[in-house]
Image: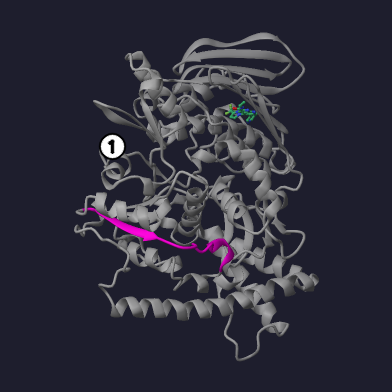
Amino acid sequence: MEKYKHKYGAEQIQVLEGLEAVRKRPGMYIGSTSVRGLHHMVYEIVDNCVDEALAGYCTEINVIIEPGNVISVEDNGRGIPVEIHPKTGISTAETVYTVLHAGGKFGGDSGYKVSGGLHGVGASVVNALSKWTEVTIQRDGGIFQMYFEKGKTIKKLEKIGNSDKTGTKVRFLADDTIFETLTYDYEVLETRFREIAFLTKGLKITLEDLRGETPKKSEFCFEGGLISFVEFLNKSKEKLHPKPIYIEKDGETPVEIAIQYTTSYSENIYTFVNNINTIEGGTHLEGFKRALTKVFNDYAREHNFLKEKDPNLQGEDIREGITAVVSVKVRDPQFEGQTKTKLGNSEVAGIVQSMVNDALSTFLEENPTVAKSILEKCISASRAREAARKARELVRRKSALETSTLPGKLADCSSKNAEECEVYIVEGDSAGGSAKQGRDRRFQAILPLWGKMLNVEKARADKIYGNDKLNPVIVAVGAGIGKDFDITKIRYGKVIIMADADVDGAHIRTLMLTFFFRYMRPLIEHGNVFLAQPPLYKLSKKGMEDIYCYTDDGLDKAFADLEAKGIPRDTLSLQRYKGLGEMNPEQLWETTMNPEKRTLIQVTMDDAIKADEIFTLLMGDAVEPRREFIEKNAKFVKNLDI
Ligand code: 0R9
């Protein structure tokens, strides 16, 4: 970390614009005013501490969610400079908190080698969007403090004591007139801080939650860095080699990569630029993939895994079962793509490619046993790919011949406008029957599933094409699968999984979600997948309209509401629905399918790492971690969601 040391001069801070603009258009500066934007407020402050760690001066960051959703972030770095800033005439610390873009991140020689922060706006934006902010700095033998409200300085920086320590502590309360909610999600913060700790070897990050009756605390510090990250990602997978392969290169654009192959069939490559998860990939990923394909093919030829007549292994064969984390630090990152998480700097592709070429080929030469086990897997993947291609061709040819042949069990809707159409994937024939009768056939289609659904986590692609349980789903959705999947071809804007609210229902939901996640991921990414919520209870009484309750809490509330209206509990008849099949078509329509009344849960994929972890855990081979997960989460299973 020492290598990042630079002297930072206060005069480098660029003064750009006022904070009023931030309060007027918060979404532009913090992404959104939803719970996601709220968490971004914390990340912006923590990012500043991480920059200080990368500069080589900070080893510990402590984050506390205080009662009332006040956030406290403290680092043990040098402390924000306190002297008067020559351009603004106020302290540098106050300048950083009150002048937009005055973080030093935007100047040329900023003292930091690289800059993080997707929005890169930092402290002043957080200050502008907070009801109040308190900043305490220990530096130059003193303790200094300043205080703001809605970005305006209430107390200027003043010395309030002496100290021989250094560091910065920021406490803030996000403004409830700006954000839709102030409730931080402990797990969301925990996941992000764990990720930062993996990416910043040796940095200790603690998170404490003091809001509830029993405080929570997590501590992350990984001396192994990315090696620990990959071990964490693979904890429930069966490994092909015991230790991750680790390669690292310093220089102008530092690159760090850890790789470990597992027996799974999926490909999990996570890429980061300046600690930002580049979900859409980019040039660093391109360089990595190219090198991987070349190195393994060269090795396979040289060591006779491939005969002269054999075609080369394809990239996808070589990436089957891989778990890798690629982290690069880029001085001036250009982010592109829909969510601005795709690295655009073209020079990075070559840098990563040549570094992986060198380091990985050396590794394989020195570790022939590891090389052999990976290559055997690649070769069997390539055979499976060929089988899958044939199966896919068959499916394609079949569907080309029978263009109008939608699955026999599908009751399609009459509208052909995908945007307004929905398909209900329904477990069981009897529920399917009720749904067919109860639906609005103009825009609602019903596809009943029956029998044992394939667990795609344990099957290779060739078993999936042409599978008699999944094929109707593929044909009904109409957009292909895997790398052929084309979101523009979907026949329904909403794909709704409707299953019973019991253990079997949860199982089928998870199987279907695993399939969508692994083979139709854009469907989830574009928000087209939903879970129907059938009611658990019906309360009825002569002369009163039936009341449906979807949760146990909802039932308690309904009883309480009715009692308040003078209708005692014992005059009501309570029906508990064990399955969708118990409902008649009208009831199913009223409670679960009528767009005016139903509740649909949209399946989102905020965090692919978390989703992969859960699917591997729930559907994969390792038994012990699954047992642990279920034990830990048993109380939450009612709301199984990804
Ligand atoms: C708890 C949250 N912590 C911070 O926000 C934080 C910002 C920060 C920092 C520096 C050190 N620690 C920090 N913590 C720093 C110090 C020096 C040079 N660069 C950075 C130095 O002592 O010379 N700063 C981030 C921006 C700035 N300081 C600056 F623009 F004010 F210089």
Q: Is residue 434 found left or right of 621 in the rendered image? A: left
Q: Can residue 334 be seen in this view?
A: yes
**Foreground: 256 or 332?**
256
Residue 410 sits in quarter:
bottom left
Q: Whereabouts is ligand 1, in terms of quadrant? A: top right
Q: What residue type is labelled 1?
A: Lys
Find out whether residue 539 is within the magenta segment. Answer: no
Q: Position of residue 564 (x, y in %)?
A: 36, 14
Give the vertical position of 215 relative to 258 (above or below). Answer: above
Residue at the image point whose x is 47% and y is 78% from the top: 389
What span is colored magenta in the figure?
Answer: 443-459
Q: Is residue 440 found left or right of 525 in the rendered image? A: left
**Foreground: 104 or 152?**
152
Find out whether residue 452 is within the magenta segment. Answer: yes
* Residue bearing mark 1: 597
Residue at the image point whose x is 28% and y is 77% from the top: 402
Q: Where is residue 342 in the image (x, y as percent from the top left)?
A: 48, 53
